[in-house]
Image (spheres, helix red, strand yellow):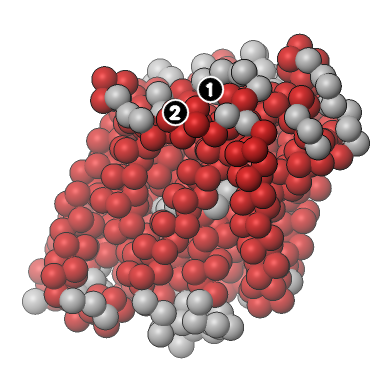
Amino acid sequence: MSTHNVWTHKGTFLLAAVGSAVGLGNLWRFPYLTGENGGGAFILVYALTIFAVGIPILIAETMLGRASRRSPIMGMRFLARTHKTSRAWESIGWLGGASAFLILSFYSVIAGWAIHYTWQMFTGSLVGADAQTVSDGFDALLASPALLTLYHTLFIIASGLIVGLGIHKGIESSLRILMPALFLILLGVLAYGFVNGDFAAAASFLFTFNLAELSLEGWLQAMGQSFFTLSLGMGAIMAYGAYMSDQASLTRTAFAVAFVDTAVAMVAGLAIFSLVFGAGLDAGSGPGLMFISLPLAFAEMPFGALIGGVFFILVLGAAISSSISLIEPVAAFLVERFDLTRPQAVFGMVLASWALGLLTVSSFNIWAETGLFHDLFGRSAFDFIELLTNIFMPLGGMLIALFAGWALTHSEVMKEMRTSETWFQVWRFLVRFVAPAAVAFVFLRTLPQVHGYLIPAIGALVIVGAFAAGRTFLVEKSQEQ
Ligand code: PFF
């Protein structure tokens, strides 16, 4: 028997999963990716991917968590044993843990920028500033390792404290306050954008699509984004799923998470583009959209400093409710495996991730153009770590889909899903074939980005790994019969 406990309420998993899903991915990444990829066409592909790949994997990942009632690594070890499959499937847990650790390291640095902007807004430092001043201000922030480290440290400590308090007193209680507050703020900012910005231009930018604008690259980015935004393949959802009530419906919950997550991305996009277009700025300003264009728009608008400050609190809150879900899978593993206390486990995870985050900090200044990572991989440490997670995430998602689709039995899945045979068949077809094929496609396209000898090395490793896992899986399966 596992020692895992369960969320206080039937609906808490939904709250926690939405908290994990809604984050920088919705508020920062989604609007700029949409801006770069021509608006509506990107959103169409994004929505299709969420439906055909995201939701089925979300169901699968939650199911593996709930069926094992353990942290992702121990859970996969348990499921591999009870299903007489190869122990190599445990790699799902390891891959997830590694990705969670890597993502937290840079997520915390970027979320830290929002602390800086919250401060700048509330103190009114940017009121009436011109484009050059705002953009120089952002450059100055990135050029300062000390400031970036300070914010990164503050953010990661706050996240660690919440998880350290435990799933009930820490995670549940904070989410119960944080999430409703975030939705209110988001609606407030939308209303503000509607009144002060150019809402019509934002809506037509986001919702009119021109298929000619749909590049293959945009298609791939939409797919990557749908994984990132739903927190898939990282053990976060599996760890939260382990605490999910048996009474909660997997399908309904997964649809609800995907719906809320997508709605938040759209509303954030509408609000941000209304303000940016209203200030006469351009949509395609890349990652600087949130930290240059938006502060500039606030700088010119009535009550801009106040609303801007509240907006950056929204960014911070959304980021924290996601970062705690990155700490949980690793911390839960350390507690289960090494009998650490929760605070010890959280401290270990957070400290290591914080230290790695210093590499991301340095990627914006001292090692922006030079240094070991540039010599070895032709890119900064931040870009390299992000690229690694872009490989791990889809890979983890694909393995989750394969395991849930092929190793779990019909009756087991039906017991978890409690659904109609038709939906079961649709789901199983999606996780068996559609999701893995889609992910393999993205994955093969990501690989060539990796510099030099790493391409064949990682490629070979993956092929050998997949082959070994598949072979042992099949051999052990057939011995079972
Ligand atoms: N889903 C989060 C976002 O959109 O910002 C990011 C994230 C959180 C990814 C947790 C992965 C994860 F496990």
Nearest the eye: 7 or 119: 119
In-front residue for pair 318/437: 318
> Taking 362 as reference, is 428 left or right?
left
Image-quadrant location for residue 43 = top left
Q: Is mark 1 within 8 Å of ligand 1?
A: no
Q: Which residue is mark 2?
A: 205
Question: To which residue does mark 1 refer?
Answer: 283
Q: Is residue 350 visible?
A: no
Question: Badges 2 and 1: C-beta atoms under 8 Å apart?
Answer: yes
Element assignment for label 1? loop
Q: Residue at x 32, y 69 (%)?
A: 251
Left or right of 247 on screen, residue 140: right
Where disc 2 sits, the SS reads helix
- Which quadrant, please, contains the C terminus? bottom left
Would you say residue 218 is visible in this rendering? yes
Instruction: From the top left corner, tell me how far across and down residue 103 is, in percent.
Output: 57, 44
Q: CA distance from mark 2 to mark 1?
A: 9 Å
Q: Quadrant of residue 333?
A: bottom right
